[in-house]
Image (cartoon, rainbow, N blue to C red):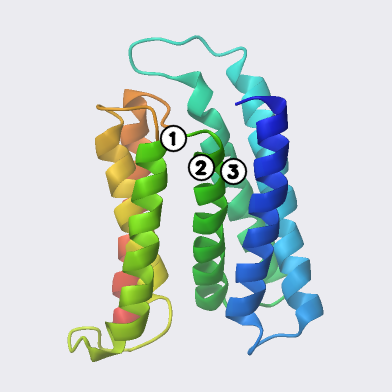
């Protein structure tokens, strides 16, 4: 990823993230609170991604590790930190905040994949966005989803995404995977998302 591409995709993707994030939460929180939380996500994701790219220069590529993909997990770590700050410091509800961040993050990732001509990654994220909006429209009709609470669409779509990443780690690097070791963190995140979804359905 060139510096110019990284900057442009960061600016465009970050702006798109902030708009989607605000649109999802505007009925429940003030704009100032939403933009403060959104700024956490953009800043933390950018900083941690940049630090991960620096770290990748010192990592040695081998049969199980592809350092070039570390920027993605740096961004995810930044999202986790921003999510914790939003819930603890700004008192945002975790389910709504997480789903808004997942949706906004998907659009941001779509921009990044598009800018880097990662067509497989772009196609998968685009299809998962379609899945998200389909679930958003229909999830309350699912009899087995007892609680009917918001969050179903985001958690399920994100879990599918990380499951695909785990599988793709043996096939392609277009998803910014970190090699075969990608199976471990992606599988763990997918499981945690599904576990959260299960708890949400029972709540």
The image quadrant that residue 177 belongs to is: top left
The CA distance from mark 1 to mark 3 is: 18 Å
> Would you say the residues marked 1 and 3 are in contact, meaning their CB atoms lie under 8 Å apart?
no
Residue located 67% across and 68% down the image: 19
Q: Earlier in the sequence, mark 2 or mark 3?
A: 3
Residue neighbourhood size for the residue with mark 3, other residues' Cα within 10 Å, grouped as few (<14), some (14–19), many (≥20): many
Q: Is residue 173 above or below residue 198?
A: above
Q: Tell whether 149 sits left or right of 45.
A: left
The CA distance from mark 2 to mark 3 is: 17 Å
Q: Tell whether 50 sits left or right of 126.
A: right
The mark found on residue 75 in the picture is 3
Q: Tell whether 44 sits left or right of 66.
A: right
Residue located 39% across and 41% down the image: 121
Q: Is residue 156 above or below residue 67?
A: below
The mark found on residue 118 in the picture is 1
Residue neighbourhood size for the residue with mark 1, other residues' Cα within 10 Å, grouped as few (<14), some (14–19), many (≥20): some
Please name the residue that numbered disc 2 is placed on. 114
Residue neighbourhood size for the residue with mark 2, other residues' Cα within 10 Å, grouped as few (<14), some (14–19), many (≥20): some
Camera-near label (2 vs 3) is 2
Instruction: Look at the image and tell me whether residue 1 can be seen.
Output: yes
Residue located 63% across and 21% down the image: 55
Which secondary structure lies at badge 1? Answer: loop
Residue located 70% across and 58% down the image: 15
């Amino acid at each position: 990823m060139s510096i110019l591409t990284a900057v442009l995709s960061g600016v465009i993707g970050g702006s798109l993230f902030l708009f989607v994030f605000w649109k999802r939460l505007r009925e429940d929180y003030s704009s100032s609170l939403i933009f403060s939380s959104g700024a956490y996500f953009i800043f933390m994701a950018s900083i941690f991604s940049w630090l991960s790219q620096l770290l990748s220069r010192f990592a040695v590529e081998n049969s199980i590790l592809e350092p070039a993909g570390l920027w993605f997990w740096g961004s995810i770590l930044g999202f986790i930190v921003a999510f914790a700050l939003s819930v603890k410091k700004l008192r945002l509800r975790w389910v709504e905040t997480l789903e808004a961040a997942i949706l906004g993050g998907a659009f941001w990732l779509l921009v990044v994949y598009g800018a880097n001509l990662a067509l497989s990654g772009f196609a998968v994220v685009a299809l998962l966005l379609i899945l998200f909006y389909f679930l958003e429209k229909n999830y309350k009709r699912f009899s087995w989803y007892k609680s009917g609470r918001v969050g179903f669409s985001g958690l399920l779509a994100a879990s599918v995404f990380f499951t695909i990443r785990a599988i793709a780690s043996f096939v392609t690097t277009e998803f910014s995977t970190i090699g075969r070791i990608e199976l471990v963190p992606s599988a763990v995140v997918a499981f945690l998302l599904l576990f959260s979804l299960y708890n949400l359905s029972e709540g």
